[in-house]
Amino acid sequence: MIWNQWYVVLDSKELKRRSPLRITRFNEQLVLWRDEAGKVCCIADKCCHRGASLACGKIIKGKLECPFHGFIYDKSGTVTSIPANGKNNPVPETMKVKSYRTSEDYGLIWIWYGDDDKIEEEPFFFKELKDFSYSTFRDHWNVHYSRAIENQLDVVHLPFVHRTTIGRGNKTLVNGPVVVREDEMITFYVNNVMDDGKTFPLKPDEIVDYQRLFHLQFHYPNIWQNFISDKIRAFAAFVPVDEENCIVYVRYYQKMIKIPLLKELMNWIGKLSNIVILRQDKRIVITQMPKKTGMKIGEHLIMGDKPIIEYRKHRQELIDRNPADN
């Protein structure tokens, strides 16, 4: 994982107001709940007293009660009450577990995975999508989240994996692609064409007016969007579970139709399309070995893999720049 980053970890609708939720993220067991104001709280899901899962407990006045012995935890992971010791006894300062900063917007929940003194004010999101309506699909993949990300950076696979959907037309020859890196954003411009047996693929610097081409964007650490048109986008968040598993949240965004019932129907149809396309990807990606990507994993990449090459380089730079203190 890349340290000192805001990660999308959950769809907001999955975290209810009255029940804590146990999740695995970053190879760790976490518990999330909402306080009395509806704010998201997140701490380690292991009571510091006897190791019970706090997610089995209850939310009491915005705090979390351990189901084993009634210890009360606040959002900072600090025990504020030990019933067996009585209300008059102070709680030892050592009674606490690790806590995580959270953020919620655009129907998504983020967790800050990093040092508290380096926290960024708010997570990055493609803010133009705020004007769109959307539908969401959640899917579990048995690969590291980096492999799932690379699949959405792969322009070479389209006519083979998606030959019946978005890859129709047998456009197997890949010009470029052109890849532009800016801060923690990668934008790549795609120009796949049919192979007439005479044409050689253009190198990235040979492509004129590449800005007019179909393009996609990825922003570290784990969100991506596809510019299908000015009024239709596909969005994905690739959520790290552990070294061999991730969850992919895919959204169909559109602002063509705003009439309530027709809008919901359009979004539902778009979601079905996303499911078909994503499952075509999943069928292949879960067979890749190793399950986690890296700079040197025995693969022989080609020019068409430039977005993946840049992703791996950039990801390694961010890892080296932000060594974890834990």
Image (spheres, helix red, strand yellow):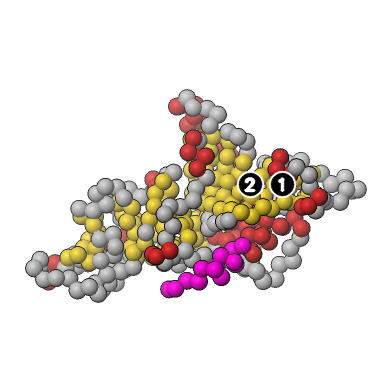
Q: Residue at x 57, y 56 (%)?
A: 184
Q: Which residue is mark 1?
A: 190
Question: Which residue is at the far top?
Answer: 259
Going by the numbered disc 2, the residue's amino acid type is: Leu
Q: Residue 315 lies in magenta, yes or no?
A: yes
Q: Secondary structure at mark 1?
A: strand
Looking at the rendered structure, the number of numbered marks drawn on it comes to: 2
Q: Residue at x 58, y 33 (%)?
A: 231
Which image quadrant is residue 82 in?
bottom left
Q: Residue at x 73, y 44 (%)?
A: 210
Return the mark for residue 58. Answer: none
Q: Are marks 1 and 2 in contact (CB under 8 Å)?
A: yes
The dominant secondary structure in magenta is: helix
Q: Is residue 281 visible?
A: no
Going by the numbered disc 1, the residue's amino acid type is: Val
Give how far across and how far down residue 220 sits, in percent.
54, 56
Q: Residue 287 lies in magenta, yes or no?
A: no
Magenta span? 314-326
Give how far across and how far down residue 190 sits, in percent.
71, 46
Give how far across and how far down residue 90 sits, in percent.
14, 70
Q: Which of marks 2 and 1 precedes in the sequence?
A: 1
**How far, Cα to Cα, is label 1 from label 2?**
8 Å
Q: Residue at x 22, y 66 (%)?
A: 79
Does residue 315 sit above or below 186 in this rendering? below
Q: Is residue 37 visible?
A: yes
Q: Which residue is mark 2?
A: 216
Q: Quadrant of the C terminus?
A: bottom left
Q: Badge 2 local density, few (<14 within 10 Å), some, or many (20+)? A: many
Does residue 93 sit above or below 67 in this rendering? below
Q: Secondary structure at mark 2?
A: strand
- Is 67 or 93 nearer to us in this picture? 93
Which image quadrant is residue 94 in?
bottom left
